[in-house]
Amino acid sequence: MNFKLFLISIIITLFAVSACESDYRPMSFGQVDEVIVVMDSTNWDSETALAIEETFGKPIETLPSYEPTYRLIFRDFRNNEELDQLRESKNIIFAAPIDSESNVASFIRAVLSDEIEERVRSGESFAFPLEDRWVRDQWTLILTSNDDDELSEKIRNSEESLVGHLMDREYERRTEEIFRRGEQVAISDSLWENHGWMVRMQHDYIETVDTTNVKVWRRSLPDNDRWLLAWWKDDVPSADFIDQEWINATRDSLLQKYVQGTREGSYITTEYSDQRSVITSEMDLDSRLTGFETLGTWRMTNDFMGGPFVNFFYHDPETERLFMLEYGQFAPSVGKRRFVRQFRAMGRTFEADSTWNSVN
């Protein structure tokens, strides 16, 4: 199964209020990376609960230490008042077999139309996302099927699309969060005018390297040092040669030269170990660009330092240009999940000028 399973949400007969200026409902509450899982308490050790933990609560393989994809909080409700409180959550999953006798199942049947219930019983559909259903800035997912085993199997088989749907919503939220406090629009405008590409820049990054085709910005704080390295190249007609080995070799060569440590001979390089993964995936972009995202951890050669990184390569076939953005962090005393998600959101703001040519 893939993302197409979410298309069924189009025919759910629900009233939805769009988040616009006329929407005066309260905002949802809760953390962006927290999910309330509403299930009957007798099913918290069921296969469905385990499947949700293995997908939405899966450990992130590309961070220096253990952090789950999302922090899951299991809840049940006994009356309408408790249900109303739960329906104010920012991220919420309702999960139960369609014909079970629990309060959660009764609620699911009340939300879904008769037509959708029959699609569930026939095995055609099981996952129904709702956007801003009860309060503003809310992500809701209803998971239901004929029985516990069937539902848990469907959840596991659809991990990429289920978690990806929430992740996309989180990128939108992170982008708003990052730039709400301020944005260096002048930097983006300058990059676009002088180099034919741009990425949105957070308010307190400072440029530290500026060459013909490399730039580095840093956001240096005592307990949270972050940076962005950008590199670009003309006359690259195809992206067919790009794979994980090439990406990491190119990254390492640029990092060695432009992101060095304070000790003599120290520089950043990719960390490869049995405990840490380096994962490259092609991005699903709604543009002419081809994109690759790489997640992993770095270490400092000749020093005892390390942290997470997020790398992007973008290829523009119209202008035959190749671009790299790499975000990194050194913050040994803080959790990394939030900042890595911020990097992933910022890197997705990249744009390239389709009219650019090398003689501009």
Image: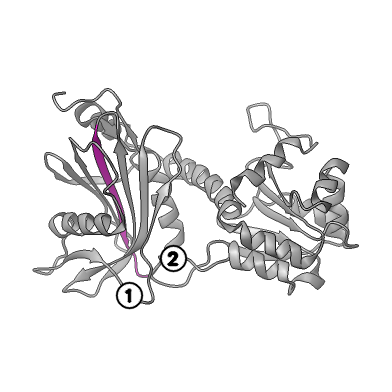
Above or below for 31 versus 135: below
Q: Residue at x 59, y 46 (%)?
A: 3
Left or right, residue 319 beside residue 101: left
Q: Position of 138 compared to 94: left or right?
A: left
Instruction: Tell me where residue 152 sits by quadrant.
Output: bottom right
Element type where label 1 sits in the image? loop
Residue drawn at point x = 75 percent, y = 49 percent: 124
Where residue 32 sits: x, y (%)? 56, 53
* Residue 195 magenta-highlighted: no
Question: In the image, what residue occupies the spot 15% across and 54% down?
Answer: 258
Which region is colored magenta? 320-333
Q: Amino acid at mark 1?
A: Ser
Front residue of 297/51: it is 51
Lateral position of residue 234 relative to residue 81, left or right? left
* Labels 2 and 1 touching (C-beta < 8 A): no
Q: Nearer the viewer, residue 227 or 110?
A: 110
Q: Quadrant of residue 333?
A: bottom left
**Gap between marks 2 and 1, in whole Å?**
21 Å
Label 1, residues with CA under 10 Å away: few <14, some 14-19, many ≥20:
few
Q: Which mark is residue 335?
A: 2
Against 270, residue 136 (above or below) is: above
Residue 229 horizontal/vertical position (percent): 24, 49
Type of the residue with mark 2: Gly
The spot of residue 81 in percent (x, y) is 84, 54
The residue closer to the viewer here, 292 or 29, is 292
Would you say the magenta stretch is mainly helix, strand or loop? strand
Residue beneath disc 1: 273
